[in-house]
Image (cartoon, rainbow, N blue to C red):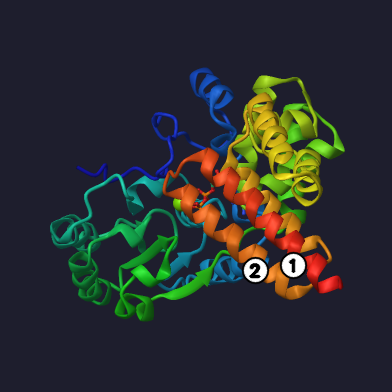
């Protein structure tokens, strides 16, 4: 059953201590220990809206609406690790301060959110009279995290509940796939899309964490972290933390080694073999580097494809090559035999080479 008054989110938040008088100050020694051992994604979860990196326009709009006490029902959507849950939690802290636990009903994917919960728990919470703490009476907040996993029935039931309780309660829906939210709910909410974070924002936030933790990260290491994160701040912080556990000095090599991704220079080397060596030699060399560095063929195929985008070749050859590489990736996803797919990768390049030679004649 859902824990009604828990604010902290889906991810493994440290066990909740009794509500502290202030949110980030004056913690007990125990809380301090928990904070110390907490994963960095939680330790550096933005506490206020000002801490949220990127999405300035969205955050400013939500901030303004919160200040003016005109918060609409919200629908935040976008890929993982972009700050949706963090933003809404920051709004909750801002709205309710130390009283947030009493004013929020948070339900995420780990809770049952079928039609029964909408009818019972959400209705009960929304219709309960809200106590007014401080000068201005506030509306309550129902957070439905990972709302795309809610059943259709529950979503339909929610339509009426949202309308009925608009006076006293605001609903914030958060999801990755907005098309899994029924249109009727979408139209009741103000939608904000959280795009993947830009490299500069990921870099700035990482630099902040690096400074706070006193880490030794060189420029190439930082660039590798930004590149591998692909706009996902959670991923960036997780890679940073695991690389830090593995090695004190964080370099590009340490980062790639920790994640098991092929290094750019390995990919260049593999692409060189594919474009120049005979079938047997390529097969031997690539099998060897795979074994030696523990690389997965699927990662090689993905990175080589990105590399092919950058090579100059007749466009019809390039198009066919990329298409064939996409097929190999698809087959690898369905757990096809690695050796056969490596053979297929080399054959694809052999065909492309023949086509390039033919085009040059
Ligand atoms: N915009 C951001 N600014 C600062 N930190 C961020 C940002 N986005 C994500 N993070 C970091 O990543 C962690 C996860 O963020 P959050 O839970 O807000 O992601 P989310 O968008 O809700 O992802 P999901 O869709 O997977 O639930 C946070 O604890 C924080 O450390
Ligand atoms: Mg989330």
Query: Within 10 angstroms of label 2, few (less than 14), some, or many (20 or more) residues?
Result: some
Q: Are marks 1 and 2 in contact (CB under 8 Å)?
A: yes
**Circle 1 Cα neighbour tier, 10 Å, few/some/many (<14 / 14–19 / ≥20):** some
How many marks overall? Answer: 2
Q: Which residue: 58% across, 65% down?
A: 63
Residue bearing mark 2: 320
Q: Closest to the observer: 166 or 340?
A: 340
What SS does tag 2 mark?
Answer: helix
Could one spot residue 94 in this view of the protein?
A: no
Q: Position of residue 89 (x, y in %)?
A: 48, 52
Residue 199 relative to residue 132: left or right: right
**Image quarter in which the N terminus is found:** top left
Q: Quadrant of residue 254?
A: top right
Closest to the observer, 225 or 355: 355
Q: Is residue 56 visible?
A: yes
- Residue nearest the viewer, comparing 29 with 345: 345
| Cα separation between marks 1 and 2 | 10 Å
Residue identified by numbered label 1: 355
Residue at disc 1, CB closer than 8 Å to ligand 1: no
Tag 1 secondary structure: helix
Residue situated in front as seen by the camera: 187 or 126 = 187
The answer to whether residue 2 is above or below residue 310 is: above
Which percent across, then down, holds residue 149? 31, 58
Q: Quadrant of residue 196?
A: bottom right
Residue 315 left/right relative to 99? right
**Relative to 276, is 73 above or below?**
below
**Residue drawn at (70%, 51%) of the image:** 304
Badge number at residue 153? none
Could you tell me residue 248's position as x and y percent? 75, 20
């Amino acid at each position: 059953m859902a824990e009604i008054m828990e604010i902290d989110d889906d991810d493994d938040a440290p066990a909740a201590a009794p509500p502290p008088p202030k949110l980030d100050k004056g913690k007990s020694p125990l809380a301090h220990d928990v904070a110390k051992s907490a994963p960095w994604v939680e330790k550096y979860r933005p506490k206020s809206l000002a801490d949220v990196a990127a999405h300035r326009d969205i955050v400013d709009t939500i901030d303004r609406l919160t200040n003016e006490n005109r918060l609409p029902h919200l629908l935040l959507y976008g890929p993982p690790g972009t700050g949706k849950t963090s933003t809404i939690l920051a709004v909750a802290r801002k709205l309710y301060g130390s009283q947030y636990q009493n004013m929020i009903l948070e339900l995420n994917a780990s809770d049952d959110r079928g039609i029964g919960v909408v009818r019972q728990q959400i209705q009960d919470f929304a219709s309960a009279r809200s106590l007014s703490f401080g000068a201005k009476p506030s509306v309550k907040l129902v957070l439905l995290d990972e709302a795309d996993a809610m059943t259709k029935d529950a979503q339909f039931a929610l339509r009426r509940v949202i309308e009925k309780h608009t006076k006293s309660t605001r609903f914030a829906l958060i999801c990755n796939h907005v098309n899994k939210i029924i249109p009727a709910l979408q139209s009741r909410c103000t939608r904000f899309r959280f795009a993947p974070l830009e490299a500069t924002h990921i870099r700035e936030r990482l630099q902040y964490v690096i400074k706070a933790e006193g880490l030794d990260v060189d420029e190439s290491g930082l660039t590798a972290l930004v590149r591998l994160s692909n706009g996902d701040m959670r991923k960036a912080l997780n890679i940073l933390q695991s690389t830090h556990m593995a090695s004190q000095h964080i370099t590009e090599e340490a980062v790639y080694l920790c994640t098991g991704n092929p290094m750019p220079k390995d990919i260049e080397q593999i692409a060189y073999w594919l474009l120049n060596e005979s079938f047997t030699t390529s097969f031997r060399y690539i099998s060897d580097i795979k074994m030696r560095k523990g690389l997965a063929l699927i990662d090689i195929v993905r990175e080589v494809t990105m590399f092919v985008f950058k090579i100059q070749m007749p466009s019809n050859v390039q198009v066919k090559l990329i298409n064939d590489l996409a097929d190999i990736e698809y087959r690898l996803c369905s757990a096809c035999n690695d050796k056969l797919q490596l053979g297929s990768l080399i054959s694809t390049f052999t065909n492309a080479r023949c086509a390039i030679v033919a085009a040059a004649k």
